[in-house]
């Protein structure tokens, strides 16, 4: 029986991952954890956990006899640029605490499977931008991206040196209607739907032609769980896998929305996030994920837009 700890359970990915894992393994076997005093999404089992507190992590591990950890707590790209030292500490020390816990428990005969998300932010301005390969130049220029690249190297190091079963995905921009944007550079692709449904024009902080890899949350959750369920011998990459859903720019997203909301207007007012987006890939090659564990996206842009317009709940 799996006993699963999800750290960062009140965040954009964590909140939906808890539900998906609970449906698969039973709600009693999924421990949601975050720094807030309560679960924001009604998790059946919830613990207050700061991933920077290694003693508390060990306590929770032993209390529930944890077999899998999803370490999702992080400061994202745009937010991280406002507080780079805080972002580095949370993003790096949080991962290190989990990897060390897995090393120690593994040496004691209690192996711990770990998931940690990397990001397209780990790439940089000299990365091959179109159909970005699995192995290529990686020269991130945000503290978030730098921490993700360093994290990838740590994951591979702990696997090679200590045989920690750690697995990772380089998430593209993730779009979801269930939780608010979390301070990332791709947040426009969520906020734009709120404006469309309110009957308001949207002021976009990226340029009209700025293409980025994106993925709809159901595909992102499916990719994450599929990777974690794959046999260990199939996982050939222990840094992080490219995983793609689709690729589009704000103009293309707007055109798809106006098929359903004809009078919707977008104005472009690029800010500091445009420079971040311009340093990232426009599309990803995820053949390695397909070859190793069968990954294939199922949701396209048209389906995403229809589902978002149907499900986004707007507040005035």
Image (tube, rainbow, N blue to C red):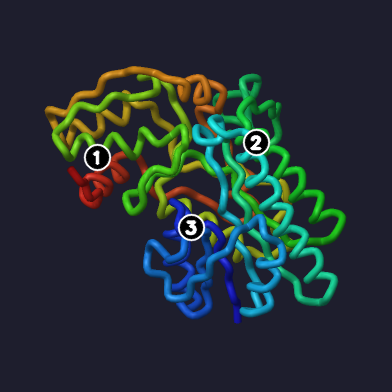
Q: Earlier in the sequence, mark 1 or mark 2?
A: 2
Residue 194: give its label. 1
Q: Is residue 179 above or below residue 138?
A: below
Residue 85: give its label. 2
Q: Identify the residue at the far right of this view.
A: 161
Residue 14: give its label. 3
Residue at image position (72%, 46%) is 239
Q: Secondary structure at mark 3?
A: helix
Between the residue at mark 3 and the residue at mark 2, the CA separation in whole angstroms equals 23 Å
Kindly indicate whether the residue at mark 2 contacts the one at mark 1 (C-beta within 8 angstroms).
Answer: no
Q: Earlier in the sequence, mark 3 or mark 2?
A: 3
Count the marks: how many?
A: 3
Q: Earlier in the sequence, mark 3 or mark 1?
A: 3
Q: Nearer the viewer, residue 186 or 10?
A: 10
Q: Quadrant of residue 70?
A: bottom right
Quarter of the rendering occupied by the N terminus: bottom right
Residue 113: give its label. none
Residue at image position (44%, 26%) is 211
Between the residue at mark 3 and the residue at mark 1, the CA separation in whole angstroms equals 22 Å
Between the residue at mark 1 and the residue at mark 2, the CA separation in whole angstroms equals 32 Å
Residue 213: x and y, percent?
Answer: 48, 34
Kindly indicate whether the residue at mark 1 contacts the one at mark 3 (C-beta within 8 angstroms).
Answer: no
Q: Nearer the viewer, residue 5 or 129?
A: 5
Residue 271: x and y, percent?
Answer: 42, 20
Quarter of the rendering occupied by the C terminus: top left
Q: Quadrant of residue 267?
A: top left
Residue at image position (27%, 46%) is 308
Residue 300: x and y, percent?
Answer: 36, 42
Q: Secondary structure at mark 1?
A: helix
């Amino acid at each position: 029986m799996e006993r699963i700890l999800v750290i960062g359970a009140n965040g954009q990915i964590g909140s939906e991952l808890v539900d998906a894992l609970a449906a698969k393994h039973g709600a009693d076997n999924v421990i949601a954890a975050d720094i807030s005093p309560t679960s924001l999404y009604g998790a059946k089992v919830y613990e207050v956990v700061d991933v920077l507190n290694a003693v508390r992590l060990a306590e929770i591990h032993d209390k529930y006899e944890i077999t899998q950890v999803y370490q999702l707590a992080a400061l994202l790209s745009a937010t991280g640029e406002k507080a780079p030292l805080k972002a580095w500490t949370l993003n790096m020390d949080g991962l290190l605490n989990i990897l060390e816990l897995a090393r120690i428990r593994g040496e004691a005969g209690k192996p711990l499977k770990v998931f940690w998300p990397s990001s397209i932010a780990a790439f940089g301005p000299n990365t091959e931008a179109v159909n970005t390969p699995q192995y290529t130049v990686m020269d991130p220029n945000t503290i978030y991206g730098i921490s993700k690249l360093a994290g990838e190297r740590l994951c591979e190091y702990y696997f090679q040196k200590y045989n920690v079963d750690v697995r990772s995905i380089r998430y593209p921009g993730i779009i979801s209607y269930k939780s608010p944007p979390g301070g990332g550079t791709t947040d426009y692709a969520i906020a734009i739907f709120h404006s469309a449904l309110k009957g308001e024009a949207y002021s976009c902080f990226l340029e009209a032609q700025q293409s980025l890899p994106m993925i709809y949350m159901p595909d992102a959750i499916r990719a994450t769980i599929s990777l974690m369920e794959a046999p260990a011998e199939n996982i050939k990459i222990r840094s992080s896998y490219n995983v793609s859903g689709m690729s589009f720019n704000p103009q293309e997203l707007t055109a798809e929305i106006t098929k359903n909301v004809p009078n919707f207007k977008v104005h472009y007012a690029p800010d500091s996030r445009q420079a971040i987006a311009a340093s990232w890939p426009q599309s990803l090659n995820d053949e390695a994920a397909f070859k190793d564990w069968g990954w294939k996206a199922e949701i396209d842009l048209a389906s995403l837009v229809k589902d978002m317009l149907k499900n986004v709940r707007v507040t005035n």
